[in-house]
Amino acid sequence: MRRLFPLPAPPAPAPDALVDVPEGADRTVGPDGVTDREWTLDELAAAYAYPAADDPVRSARPGWLRANMVSSLDGAAHHEGRSQPLSGDADMRIFGVLRALADAVVVGAETVRREGYRPARARAAFAERRAAAGQGPAPAIAVVTAGLDLDFSLPLFTVPLVPTLVLTGAGAPEDRVRAARAAGVEVLFAGEGRGVDPARVAAALAERGHTRLLSEGGPRLLGQFAAAGALDEMCLSLAPVVAVGDAQRIMDGPAVAVPERFGLVSVLEESGFLFTRYRRF
């Protein structure tokens, strides 16, 4: 893996130093993130660290919601219904690091059903880091759903290391809310109608102490977050593959009057994959 942006500033040469670099020589050697090598988990964690609570970029925001998605070169968010065929080793390492840094992983009910979601697991490599940050052993999974059409006998709900949460609206079906609670699932209301108001998700989770949020989709939920102005950061992996077909884009939500502009934070590369990170202005 190597960093393509931002590049570190070159060291200033000593006064009167004679610089003689042969033509074609590697000018990027050294522990600077530019040399193509496998990054450690600590280096990836530092590269993807959440902004501090007192960072001005988080001013007046109850938490920080970042999204992590992978896309093919032709814009597909999945192949035959699953994102795994677009992924690779480096993408999965970053996926694991992003989860390990989060308080909660926010995901749509359809993605839970389609991808066969399981509880997040604890990782020994991040145990000390999470404890120092006041986090539990693993992130909670927070499922966004209007109808609560979920199988509460699945491992996601029955054997999570950290209790799974369900986010829904105050008008959700009462029998399904009762079924969730009977299964030991905590139900949070983040909307007045049947469904969730995406602009209220971060605040609802912040009340439970979850301020470092990660959304893994799906495209419809991510589109709703973006349209509501609730998305703070986009971590997009661009896979060097062409999927064709009729797969969704990474976001599929209501139209916005004016496209929102995000600023580029960083670009990493490995094996042809580009790992980009954008942040709202």
Image: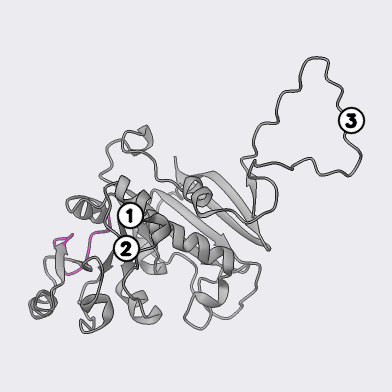
Is the C-beta separation of discs 3 and 2 under 8 Å? no
Local packing at callout 2 (Cα closer than 10 Å; few below 14, some 14-19, many 20+) is many
The residue nearer to you, when weighing 259 against 143, is 143
Between disc 3 and disc 1, the foreground one is 3
Q: Residue furthest top?
A: 15
Q: Which residue is mark 3?
A: 20
Q: CA distance from mark 2 to mark 1?
A: 7 Å
Judging depth in this view, the residue of 120 and 216 nearest the camera is: 120
- Residue shown at 91% from the left, 38% from the top: 22
Q: Which residue is mark 2?
A: 106
Q: Indicate which disc, 3 or 2, sits on the residue closer to the N terminus.
A: 3
Mark closest to the chain's N terminus, 3 or 1: 3
> Who's the residue at 64% across and 55% down the image?
1
Quarter location, residue 155: bottom left
Is 256 left, or right, of 182 in this rendering?
right
Instruction: Tell me the CA gap for discs 3 and 2.
Output: 53 Å
Q: From which residue to which does the magenta span run?
A: 189-198
Q: Amino acid at mark 1?
A: Leu
Mark number, residue 213:
1
- Is residue 39 highlighted in magenta? no
Q: Amino acid at mark 3?
A: Asp
Q: Position of residue 178 (x, y in %)?
A: 8, 77
**Mark 3 neighbour class, 10 Å CA radius: few under 14, some 14 to 19, many 20 or more:** few
Q: Secondary structure at mark 3?
A: loop
